[in-house]
Amino acid sequence: MNRYLVPLLLTTLLVACDGGGEDGAPGTSRDGDTDATVGPKPDALPTFADLDLYADDAPVNAPIPAGAPLDPESADYVAKIAEIAADPDTPPVLAYGQYSSTVFTADTDTPRRDVHLTCGGPWGLGVDTLADVPIPDYAEAAWDADGADNPVPTGGCGENADQDNHLIILDLANRCEYDLWQARKENGRWVASWANAIPLDSSGIYAHGLSTRGSGFAFAGGLVWPDELNTGEIRHALVMSYPLTRAGGPVPPASESDGWSSDPAALPEGARLRLDPTLDLGSLPLTPVERALARAMQTYGIYLVDDGGNPQLYAVDPASVSRFPYDHLDLAEDYERLDGIPWDKLQVLQLPSQDPDFQDHLALPDDGCATFR
């Protein structure tokens, strides 16, 4: 069941959930995270280019080909998106405080820890541990303060909680990404309701689902990094959650779905959209943040990766580092409204067929990164 928190949202997946966290002040423990270890976080994250996330032809890295056809129903889909974006209760936003994720990097010296998985048993997956996850001493999960009235239960599976509290670890030495949902420390040990791992040289899609997004996309895929917003150059696709996701399964490249709607204007997860490439962005009164996002939307597009309460893009949670990393964002806020982007000028690219049988293919990965017990 999806929960809408004005003006942001909690997105819950069919088998794994997505969201993010609010930073108190970067470098400090979050309210409610009484076991958090706060130490010497880095001053800044690596640049996006230095991370080399995913294969060159990964869905989020590949520019939209010239002449890519639009879906025959594109105009109807976009009319609904524009209607939702114009509603004051569902504004389009860039989430960077709540409902995104903290990100930490690991190397050969980073301590390895077992993460207890509280939803592994209730979901019938036959595992309760993701083993040997490299988690720095100073790492902390994102904190969804808006959902604190219905928190993740201690020791339990939080599928009905109003918090997601994500954490991403990028193991740059072994080229693995670890995605944790509802991550926390309980009695000194790391716990998550669910977690999984994927090679950083892969497509960035969990081939057999069981991701921490609704669609099978790795959580770092499509995140906007501080250096990208500060320079105005984003060289990858964006990802979006949306309140009208179609039931009936995902479309490629997505491998799973938490879509629910039978509305003819609902979009399936995995859909790729773009901002009209003929639009002259120089003629629009865009903020620096909107301009950077709009350029990426024209060149690389946006993938629909989750169900949620409003159109929402994602940037890295500032609590990943000790100093607030964004030149054009506000330390006191959790999100940036994107009212200046002309949402009625989006286009939906040709939609592949949905996979109604995706649940039959859900499975734990066997790719050298995730070790389950």
Image (cartoon, grey):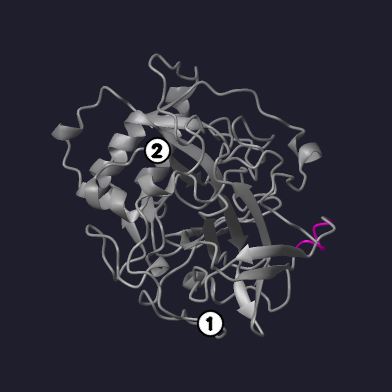
Circle 2: residue type: His
> Is residue 310 rendered to the left or right of residue 177?
left
Magenta: main secondary structure = loop
Residue at the (20%, 28%) spot, across then down: 280
Residue tagged 1 = 32
- Quadrant of the rendering where the N terminus is positioned: bottom right
Look at the image and tell me whether residue 151 can be seen: no
- The amino acid marked with disc number 1 is Gly
In this rendering, position of residue 28 left or right of residue 261: left
Position of 354 with respect to 78 (left or right) is: right
Q: Earlier in the sequence, mark 2 or mark 1?
A: 1
Q: Is residue 219 above or below residue 7?
A: above
Q: Nearer the viewer, mark 2 or mark 1?
A: 2
Location of residue 125 (image quadrant): bottom right
Q: Quadrant of residue 322?
A: bottom left
What segment carries the magenta color? Answer: 119-124
Task: Please give the residue where the numbered disc 2 appears in the rendered image.
Answer: 236
Q: Which of 307 and 142 is in front in this view?
A: 142
Name the secondary structure under disc 1.
Answer: loop
